[in-house]
Amino acid sequence: MTLLDENRLFPSEPNARAVARRLYTNVRDLPIISPHGHAEPRWFAEDEPFPDPAQLFVVPDHYISRMLYSRGISLEQLGVGSTPLEDPRRIWRIFAENYYLFRGTPTRLWLDFAFQELFGLDTRLKPLNADAYYDAIMDKLKAPGFRPRALFERFRIEVLATTDSPLDSLPYHETVRRSAFKGRIIPTFRPDPVVDPDFPNFVENLGSLGQMTHADTASWQGYLSALRQRRMEFKALGCTATDHGHPTAATADLGVDSAALLYQKIASGAGDQAERELFRAQMLTEMAAMSLDDGLVMQIHPGSFRNHNARLFERFGRDVGADIPMPTNYVQALHPLLKRFGNEAGLTLIVFTLDESTYSRELAPLAGHYPCLRLGPAWWFHDSPEGMMRFREYTTETAGFYNTVGFNDDTRAFLSIPARHDVARRVDCSFLARLVVEHRIDEDEAGEIASELAYELARKAYRL
């Protein structure tokens, strides 16, 4: 028995399945480009064994915790917010007892891939074998081949980008660069703590930014200078991209005096909701201008109502699975930025969405026209086989393949990286196989596209 069928995610129609399998064979073992994710640089700096299955699989993965929480299991029971864990085996047993909840979800595909391909477990996780699973995984985690650096190489990761605060001095990245480890692990500049007035401790963060850079962040020009300095310090450690998690895609292009006046109000902790949104909008345009200067690729991830569950936010803080997609406008929202920079081929702006209705109506037409725009892959709630297939169906006819940027895994669960890329490669090969059997493209073209989607587009778009 195996957990994974070799034909998973391929078309059921025999001719299309045969084409998909041939395409997949040629891309299955390509190196992994992971240009956007949330792996901890500390893992690779310290290269210590992962502690136990609960902390490896359950605690950090909000795809798991949000499902279990939805069924009445508290985050305290799952060890979220607890360091160290009092009883990791008990957490694992809870997970095993509820593993059936993940039937049909991409999380199940990712987990089964890790269980089978990494740990040699070929029976489905159930309450009766929970302890046997736990012990088998623990035994493997003690081996040198299961330390972070060894797994990085085993996964054939060519580049892995982390996501980092502008207030982070990046000591772990420094350690990795000074070590004998040859893996390429690079930071990504995520300025939300100092550009989003609704971010916790925003005013204090501006002060910390000034202290780090010795810039006068009490002034508009000093603040912009501090951001430019931090970007260059990130770039010195290999950073090639910025990332912006704004609530909306709104952009603005204020005059210098108006922007300075707005900043004075925002930096003092004042400003109403509309002014705070206007400031975020202005900062996206300012970041685009900086990207033209320093060459960093710019990513926008709008459309999430973050920390929707106020009780969990108060108890556990950010990023515990309580973020919910919202409708998002792009045509009007991006217009000020695109009016200024949209025709600049030297700028790369990758736009993501949680609002699938915008793919064919707004995003694909925009990316199919403006030289600076690229479409980010199906993201977060839609990084599923169905979501990936819808993305290709809704965008290809207008934007084509080459105005997209391949795939990124966007994960905090390190062991899911090869599984997620495998799912993406299988889905893309299935989509291409359908075009081949419908005589819309030839199989040799499909092979070239499959390789681009699996590897080359991400490498090029993120300037890696």
Image (cartoon, rainbow, N blue to C red):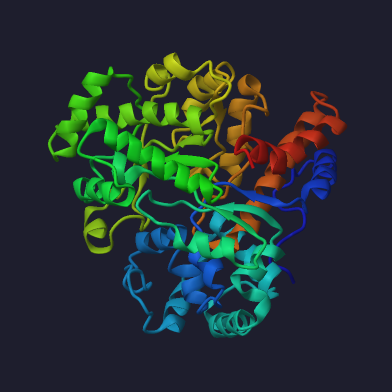
Q: Position of residue 314 (x, y in %)?
A: 21, 59
Q: Which residue is drawn at 69% across and 61% down?
A: 155
Q: Please tell me which residue lies in front, 284 or 220.
A: 220
Query: Which quarter of the image is occupied by the C terminus?
Result: top right
Q: Please tell me which residue lies in front, 215 or 148.
A: 215
- Above or below, 190 against 391 in this view is below
* Residue 131 in view here: yes
Q: Where is residue 60 in the image (x, y as percent from the top left)?
A: 44, 65
Q: Residue at x 42, y 19 (%)?
A: 331
Q: Please tell me which residue lies in front, 117 or 35.
A: 35
Q: Position of residue 41 (x, y in %)?
A: 50, 62
- Above or below, 244 against 308 in this view is above
Name the residue at the front extreme.
214
Q: Which residue is drawn at 35% across and 48% down?
A: 323
Q: Quadrant of residue 190?
A: top left
Q: Quadrant of residue 372?
A: top right
Determine whether, in the image, residue 317 is placed left or right of residue 413: left
- Above or below, 72 against 201 in this view is below
- Above or below, 291 against 420 in this view is above
Determine whether, in the image, residue 165 is placed left or right of residue 46: left
Q: Please tell me which residue lies in front, 14 or 418.
A: 418
Determine whether, in the image, residue 283 is placed left or right of residue 449: left
Query: Which quarter of the image is occupied by the N terminus?
Result: bottom right
Q: In which quarter of the image is residue 217?
A: top left
Q: Where is residue 439 in the image (x, y as percent from the top left)?
A: 83, 24
Determine whether, in the image, residue 220 is placed left or right of residue 73: left
* Residue 40 in view here: no
